[in-house]
Image (spheres, rainbow, N blue to C red):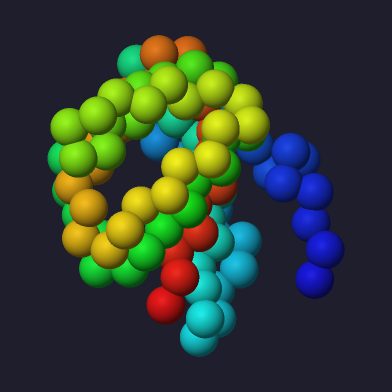
Amino acid sequence: MNKNIKDLIEYPKEGIFSKEIIKNDKLDMTLFCLAAGSEISEHTSTKQGVIYVLEGDGIFNLEGKDIKMLPGVVIHMKENAVHALKAEKNTSFILILIK
């Protein structure tokens, strides 16, 4: 299956849009599109994850450290790491959770 991720980006007027790209027994890959000003509150995941920022500008807080979310930035999260984020502009990223 081949997809151009950039063609799947669509920003809601407010809030968050997500679209599953790949889901199998090894990984989950999801596209997230956040409208400017949207937030995802502090939470954890039982899986290790990688975030790849496609577009936008935001702040990703990983275990108390702020990381600027700009195009091309890659963020690695260990399992059970506390994290949250806020989109300052429309922001899209790929989240890959590794099982």
Q: Identify whether 98 is placed above or below 24.
A: above
Number of marks drawn: 0
Q: Identify whether 48 is placed above or below 91.
A: below
**Is the C terminus in the top left, top right, bottom left or bottom right quadrant?**
bottom left
Task: Pinpoint residue 90: horizontal percent, then vertical percent.
Answer: 51, 20
Residue 73 falls in which quadrant of the image?
top right
Can the viewer see residue 1 in this picture?
yes
6 vs 53, nearest the viewer: 53
Residue 11 falls in which quadrant of the image?
top right
Q: Judge left or right: residue 41 versus residue 1.
A: left
Q: Judge left or right: residue 32 versus residue 37.
A: right
Task: Pinpoint residue 72: horizontal percent, then vertical percent.
Answer: 63, 31
Residue 49 falls in which quadrant of the image?
bottom left
**Is the N terminus in the top left, top right, bottom left or bottom right quadrant?**
bottom right
Can the viewer see residue 41 in this picture?
no
Q: Judge left or right: residue 81 versus residue 10.
A: left
- Residue found 44% across the figure and 64% down from its top: 97
- Residue found 29% across the figure and 24% down from its top: 66
Task: Pinpoint residue 5: horizontal percent, then vertical percent.
Answer: 72, 46
Q: Identify whether 70 is placed above or below 7.
A: above
Q: Identify whether 95 is placed above or below 42.
A: below
The residue sitting at the bottom extreme is 25
